[in-house]
Image (cartoon, rainbow, N blue to C red):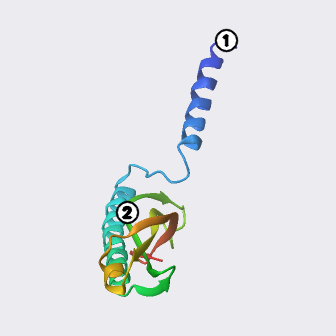
Amino acid sequence: MRNQHPVYLVLLSVVLALNLSGPFTAVADSGSSAAQKSFEQFVNVWMSKLDRIGKKNILRIDVMPRDQGFVGRYVCYGPECKFSVKETGSPETPFVGVLHYSEKHFLKKGETRQKTIQSPGMLTEKIRVTEIFRFTHGKWVY
């Protein structure tokens, strides 16, 4: 019986290591490696879209009179982000991708509308965003 305990402990350690590796870890086989690279490309495109939205938000800032001056608010995203890919075991949707980034709220102040628009934005709030995408029919879907 003594010789069986080390084998049992090794098997238990392997099972625990697999379960404790976290819910969104990439598995190192060729399929998931390709999915990881594919999702990285998808994330780059997605974050570029969010960057363009943020730049448009800055240009379209709505300046309002407030407290003997003016204020304007806008929202930007990223650019920093983290992502991971997980296998699902489903043949229809073999992977899900999880993306984390920040939604940043900014405030501009000034004595006039023009000075408000030209002023640097002050970060007032940072919200952590998590988005989950599925890999279906060979492409990443929101």
Q: Quarter-wise, where is residue 80 in the image?
A: bottom left
Question: Which residue does the image show at 33% across and 66% down from the upper left?
Answer: 38
Q: Position of residue 125 (x, y in %)?
A: 51, 65
Q: Secondary structure at mark 2?
A: helix
Which residue is under mark 1? 2
Q: Quarter-wise, where is residue 112 in the image?
A: bottom left
For the residue marked with disc 1, what is the amino acid? Arg
Mark 2, Cα crowd under 10 Å, few <14 / some 14-19 / many 20+, is: many
Which residue is under mark 2? 35
Q: Is residue 52 left or right of residue 137?
A: left
Mark 1, Cα crowd under 10 Å, few <14 / some 14-19 / many 20+, is: few
Question: Which residue does the image show at 62% across and 31% down from the upper left?
Answer: 12
94 or 59: nearer the viewer: 59
Question: Which residue does the image show at 55% across and 34% down from the upper left?
Answer: 14
Name above or below for residue 17 compared with residue 26: above
Count up the numbered dots.
2
Q: Position of residue 64 (x, y in %)?
A: 47, 87
In space, the residues marked 1 and 2 are separated at their CA atoms by 44 Å
Q: Is residue 128 left or right of residue 140?
A: right
32 or 55: nearer the viewer: 55
Image quarter of the N terminus: top right
Name above or below for residue 127 compared with residue 21: below
Q: Position of residue 115 (x, y in %)?
A: 32, 80
